[in-house]
Amino acid sequence: DGGITQSPKYLFRKEGQNVTLSCEQNLNHDAMYWYRQDPGQGLRLIYYSQIVNDFQKGDIAEGYSVSREKKESFPLTVTSAQKNPTAFYLCASRDRPDGINYGYTFGSGTRLTVV
Amino acid sequence: AQSVAQPEDQVNVAEGNPLTVKCTYSVSGNPYLFWYVQYPNRGLQFLLKYITGDNLVKGSYGFEAEFNKSQTSFHLKKPSALVSDSALYFCAVRTPGGSYIPTFGRGTSLIVHP
């Protein structure tokens, strides 16, 4: 079955550490997105990529970095510069930026906790 | 600019009763509207969309939504709620063209009581 796989499901980070969240899709989708979800705040866009080797900052990109070296993969690194990283992180994709399906396919998320 | 408002943080309904989850939007131009559902510690699942055509849109799990252009609303409805419908519901809007990035509402927690 096609879909989006996020790993790990749970991740613990010590203060000052960088951590990388994995997002892999086998849907052959061009566009991929990272969102952060906090209680009562909905989804906030961190970064997005509409094509391989290209990505754009979203609304809350500070303290995060991404790469898009392959169509299937869009990893997110939470750097030590992100002062409040504890959140639920969601990866999504769409077959084209203007996709005929118009909607996203989401992964199951990674819950990151700073310890 | 585009925005979405979900005025209720939580909606409570008894099983078997009809449910409504409200959503209003603001865009320049014609809207593309979406509803998603999220179960605990899971990603969002697509429920339904309005792009054009009939104002009443039917989606998954017996849900439907009505597009009302004059009231800029896209309320989610179901004639008879199930306990298993309890989840977090998100409304989203975007416009044709541009960056194709939708704006999500803050979410409404639906609780269906047995």
Image (cartoon, coloured by chain):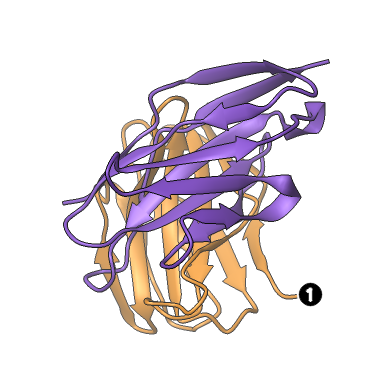
Chain colours: A orange, B purple
| Vertical comparison of A101 with A63: above or below | below
Position of residue A11 in the picture relative to residue A79 (left or right): right
Q: Which quadrant of the rendered structure holds the N terminus of chain A? A: bottom right
Q: Residue at x 62, y 55 (%)?
A: B58
Residue A81 in sight from this viewpoint: no
Residue B37 image position (x, y, % from top left): 61, 43
Q: Which corner quadrant of the image does residue B4 belong to?
A: top left
Position of residue B15 in the picture relative to residue B105 (left or right): right
Q: Which corner quadrant of the image does residue A12 belong to?
A: top right
Q: How crowded is mark 1: few (under 14 residues within 10 Å), some or many (20 or more)?
A: few
Q: Report the number of numbered marks.
A: 1
Residue B49 image position (x, y, % from top left): 51, 59
Residue B42 vs residue A87, the one in the foreground: B42
Residue B49 vs residue A50, the one in the foreground: B49
| Vertical comparison of A21 with B52: above or below | above
Give the secondary structure at mark 1.
loop
